[in-house]
Amino acid sequence: MDRKTLDKLIRPLPKGRTIFGYSRGRYALMLLREIAAYGLTIREIKQTEFGKLLNLPAVAPLRSRCGDGRLRVEAVDRALTEQPVEYQFFLTLGVWGAPPQIDWRPYHQQTSRPGFNLVLQLNFPERHNRDYAKLIDPTGKRVFYQNGHPNCRRENYITLAWVRLDIDPVRREALIEEVQSDWLRDAWACRRALPIKRNENGWRFERFDVSRGMINRRLPVYVDRVLAPYRPLWSEATLAAAIHVLRCEFRIDHLYYHTLKSTAVFKQMDTDDPPRSLYTDLPRKFCFLPTRQFPRFLADEPHPIVRFARKQEGVTWQRLAL
């Protein structure tokens, strides 16, 4: 999207701290709340792609409240309120891309068309930041940030993950370009590569130098104890936050997600394939369905690279029908 559209989207949003409370499986209740607005019965929901959500543990308290067999918004709201919140994440926004008049190379910009993406950043809770300062770097240096990636740079925020979004507010469409976490990936990579030596006093962890700073002997404690709970949760929480913002703040009706094929074709990615699960397991979990239909703003994009990509055979997408 162009910068003017992006700025217009961001301008009315809250400027203070935005808390996003999350617990594992909460996405199911959030999606069912959207479905509840249609006044469907449980039986009717079971016939849709959202039926699998009804069997998840997080949804069990909700089903017991549907005595007449109909799912209601009030019941879902109550279930969301009563569900304990495990993590208080902080949401921030960023910008990714370059003006369309600048030479656009999809492999470098990693966007499906020229212009900008809105970046939604999921930042760690404060308790993580305290543990990180105590174990790794009390100065607040963000050791596992990748230079040039859209992490939050504001003081007292450490980005766990982000999602890049291309949005057309007129057509009420959005495309999820990428979901990623540098922090977890690099922390685990350093943990695996950390040299360990045995001496007379037992195991000793050597200091390990990486391009983003010095990792000391406390790294295994930080990764194995502090970061471990976020590993199975981060992608689910990030996508849940993105859908919440797109629906509640931007009133998006048509939400698309890349497949491995479409992201390879539209971003000219011949090598360095992204993690497969983020383009298969994650959208499937959120009830995205495969489709050959793609965002209309890409259908209307005149850039020759996009026109060429549209003509490629076998390109499929994923779409969330809310």
Image: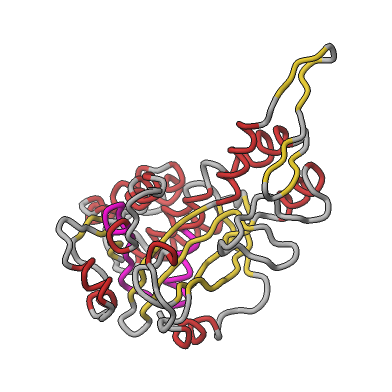
Q: Residue 185 sits in which quadrant?
A: top right
- Who is closer to the viewer here, 260 or 57? 260
Q: Is residue 180 above or below residue 5?
A: above
Q: Residue 166 sits in which quadrant?
A: bottom left
Give the residues in magenta. Answer: 240-263
Q: Is residue 165 left or right of residue 141?
A: left
- Who is closer to the viewer here, 192 or 211? 211
Q: Residue at x 27, y 74 (%)?
A: 298
Q: Disc count in the image?
A: 0
Q: Is residue 30 left or right of residue 40?
A: right
- Who is closer to the viewer here, 154 or 229? 154
Relative image position of residue 198 (x, y in whole percent) = 75, 15
Colouring convention used in this rendered image of the protein: secondary structure
Relative image position of residue 139 (x, y in whole percent) = 83, 55
Q: Is residue 103 magenta?
A: no
Q: Is residue 165 above or below residue 162?
A: below
Extreme residue toward the top, this view? 200
Q: Residue at x 71, y 54 (%)?
A: 142
